[in-house]
Amino acid sequence: MRSLYSGASMALATLLLSGCIREARIAIPSQLAIASQRLELTDMGAGERGQFQLGSSKGHFTRSAIHTASEDGFLVQNSGGGTFVVAGPDVEGELSARCDFGEVEIHSGVVVATAQRFAYRCRFQRDGQPIEAGLILEEIPRSPGKLLSGRTRAGKLHFADHVIGIRAIHDMEGGRMPTGTPLGYMFDIEGRQIGAVDLNGLNKTIHAPNSGPEREAVIAASVALSILWDPGE
C-alpha cells in the first residue's frame, strides 16, 4: 500500500503546522467566493481512517490506495477507495458514501501510456439506505484530441434531481504556475458555478451554496473527493 506522505511532504507538513509558510490556495472566481459559504473540513489528516469535523457536523472516514506492478514493470495498476459517514446540521440525516478508483499504465522505458484511464466512482446513502445519487470522475486530456496536451479530470454528480458538473482546478491564487495534480474541483450546473472544494493543504475548504438542495450536493461531492488518495500524487 502506498503512503500518502513522502519524506518531503512530511517536512512540508511540519513547516505548515509550525506556521513557517502559508499554504497555497486554489484560484476561484471572486463572485463565487462572495456568494458561497466557507466550510472547513478538518482533522482528516493523512491516515487510512479517522474522525473529521465538517463545519458544525462530524463524521468518520476510511480510505486505501494500492500500487502494484507486473514482474517486468511493464504494467502498473493503481486502485483503492474509501468511505465516509457524516451527520449534523450541514446535511440531512446521516449521509454516507462508498467510493473506488482504478487506473492501469504501461511503462516502457521513459514512455508512460494509459491502458485504462483513471476513474473514481461513488455511491451515496442516507440513514443507511441507498439514494438516487452517484459521482463519477475521470481523467481526460486538457485539450481534447491532442496527444501531448497534459491531462486533467472532469465528471458529474447526480444527486436527487440535480446533475452537477465537476472539473479539476489546477490554478493557484495569485497567478502562480498551474500544477499537474488537481488542487481542487469546481462544481457547476449548465455552466453556472455553484461551489468548489480546495483540497490543497492539511485541511480542506468547501465553498458551498448558502441554502437549497444544491448545498448538500456540493458538500457530498466535496467530502467524497477529499477522501481520495490520489494516485497522481
Image (cartoon, rainbow, N blue to C red):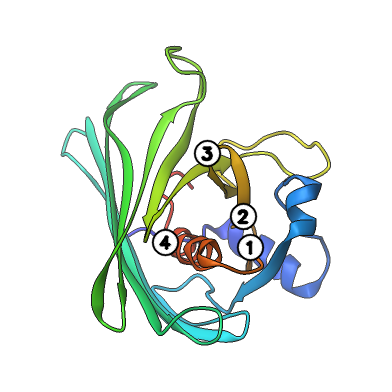
Q: Residue at x 66, y 68 (%)?
A: 210
Q: Amino acid at mark 3?
A: Glu
Identify the residue position indicated by label 1 in the image: 209
Question: Tag on residue 190?
Answer: 3
- Crowd band around label 1 with a 10 angstrom C-alpha radius: few (<14), some (14–19), many (20+): many
**Mark 1 or 3, nearer chain start:** 3
Q: Nearer the viewer, residue 44 or 19?
A: 44
**Mark 4 or 1, nearer chain start:** 4
Q: Residue at x 78, y 49 (%)?
A: 31
C-alpha separation, residue under disc 2 versus residue under disc 1:
6 Å
Q: Amino acid at mark 4?
A: Ser
Under circle 4, the secondary element is loop
Q: Position of residue 39 (x, y in %)?
A: 66, 71
Q: Position of residue 58 (x, y in %)?
A: 51, 86
Under circle 1, the secondary element is strand
- Crowd band around label 4 with a 10 angstrom C-alpha radius: few (<14), some (14–19), many (20+): few
Q: Residue at x 17, y 39 (%)?
A: 70
